[in-house]
Amino acid sequence: MAEENFFERVYVIARQIPFGKVTSYGAIAKALGAARSARMVGWAMNACHNMDDVPAHRVVNQKGLLTGKHHFDGTNLMQQLLENEGIKVVNNQIVDFEKHFWKPEVES
């Protein structure tokens, strides 16, 4: 199925996001040559909640909002995981987003 192949390609990039860095759904989609598929990247992140080797907590929306946080167990698990990596989060948004942003199309 083509969707499974796309999801696996998303996971390959997500696994490369460095500790203490984040990227966006759109940046991953762009790196895959599917710039209009940010929502599908989000579906892939939602589908990987049982995959311990995919750091889904490091993927946020284009403004640094933790839009996927409701897919994590616990109220603030996504935020806690990011803060454990030194990323400050206030009101579900990453502080100094540009400083923590990782561009997969450039750095992967």
Image (cartoon, helix red, strand yellow):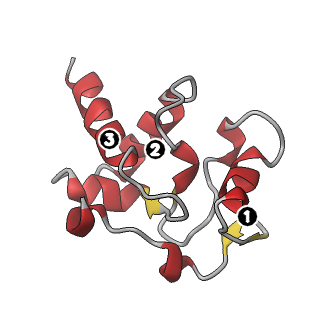
Q: Secondary structure at mark 2?
A: helix
Three-letter amino acid code at disc 2?
Gly
Label 3 crowd (10 A; few <14 / some 14-19 / many >=20): many
Pointer 1 or 3: first along the chain? 3
Q: Circle 2 sits on which residue?
A: 42
Question: Toward which corner of the image does residue 101 lie, by quadrant?
Answer: bottom left
Determine the residue positioned at 24% across, 58% down.
108
Q: Would you name the residue on which mark 3 appears?
A: 10
Q: Position of residue 67 (x, y in %)?
A: 62, 54
The x, y position of residue 52, in whole percent, is 54, 29
Residue 73 falls left or right of residue 20: right
Can you see residue 7? Answer: yes
- In whole angstroms, how far apart are the C-alphas of marks 2 and 1? 17 Å
Q: Earlier in the sequence, mark 3 or mark 2?
A: 3
Identify which amino acid the numbered label 3 is placed on. Answer: Val
**Residue drawn 44% across the image and 58% down it:** 18
Quadrant location of residue 41?
top left
Q: Amino acid at mark 1?
A: Asn
Residue at the spot 22% in from the left edge and 27% down from the top edge: 5
Residue indicated by mark 1: 92
The residue lying at 41 percent from left, 47 percent from top is 39
Q: Secondary structure at mark 1?
A: loop
**Furthest residue toward top:** 1
Q: Nearer the viewer, mark 3 or mark 2?
A: 3
Quadrant position of residue 75: top right
